[in-house]
Amino acid sequence: IILCDSDGIVDMTHHALARRTGIPIEHIESGIKILESKDPYSRSNNEDGRRITRLDDHRDWGWQIVNHKHYRNMKNHEDRREYKRKKQQEYREKDSKNSNKINDRVDTKCPQKSTKSTSVYVYVCSLYKDIDEKAWLDFEDHRKEIKKPLTEKAASLAAKKMSGYSKETQQQMVDDAIEKRWTTVFLPKEEKQSTEVIYQ
């Protein structure tokens, strides 16, 4: 199969095959004899199960691989599978690098860090020390549930809105986002109104 052309033709003599492959001529001749023979147990009905057929009856060299198209399609399928496998591996490596990039930038001295903490929480906690862990993890779970996992930018924007408020207010912001299926958090109306009164 390796030495055939795109149409499955091997137009070479026994000696040429031996020279190209490094296989002894006697093994080449005995192997070709087997491949040219009928095979009643073959899964293919083409040419009575023969693997190869001669190009011309008047010479004992030069062959057509009977099921070359099938083998070629099989190889193309395997190539596609290998391509997809490599792409998935590249994606996983890229995703891993992005996670490591976040971890490299976080402050691991986050005062609220626990065993449940995620890399995203540790990251936002390095920016805003007062982010409540429970409220934040609820928000992360909500984003995953609506199939919009938090990016680094989205996380920092949401954390900025939550920072400076009590744990209760932060939880209320997250609860409102969950209830209304928002992708970010907003200050509760009553909290916003009280803040406006203070600054008037």
Image (cartoon, rainbow, N blue to C red):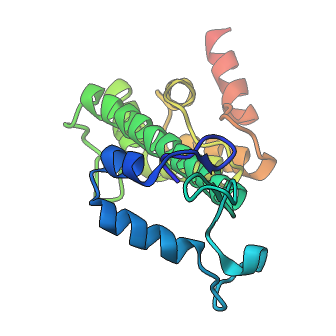
Residue drawn at (61%, 70%), measured in percent from left and top? 51
Q: Is residue 53 visible?
A: yes
Vertical arrangement, residue 69 with respect to residue 50, above or below: above
Residue occupying the far front of the picture = 58
Residue occupying the far left of the picture = 109
Vertical arrangement, residue 31 with respect to residue 99, above or below: below
Residue drawn at (28%, 47%), measured in percent from left and top? 113
Vertical arrangement, residue 12 with respect to residue 77, above or below: above
Residue 29 placement, left or right of 109: right
Residue drawn at (56%, 46%), measured in percent from left and top? 4
Residue 154 placement, left or right of 23: right
Is 198 or 31 nearer to us in this picture? 31
Quadrant of res 61: bottom right
Query: Could you say where residue 56 lies in the image, as x and y percent from the top left?
Result: 69, 54
Residue drawn at (47%, 49%), measured in percent from left and top? 13
Is 115 or 25 nearer to us in this picture? 25
Residue occupying the far right of the picture = 180
Is 65 or 54 nearer to us in this picture? 54
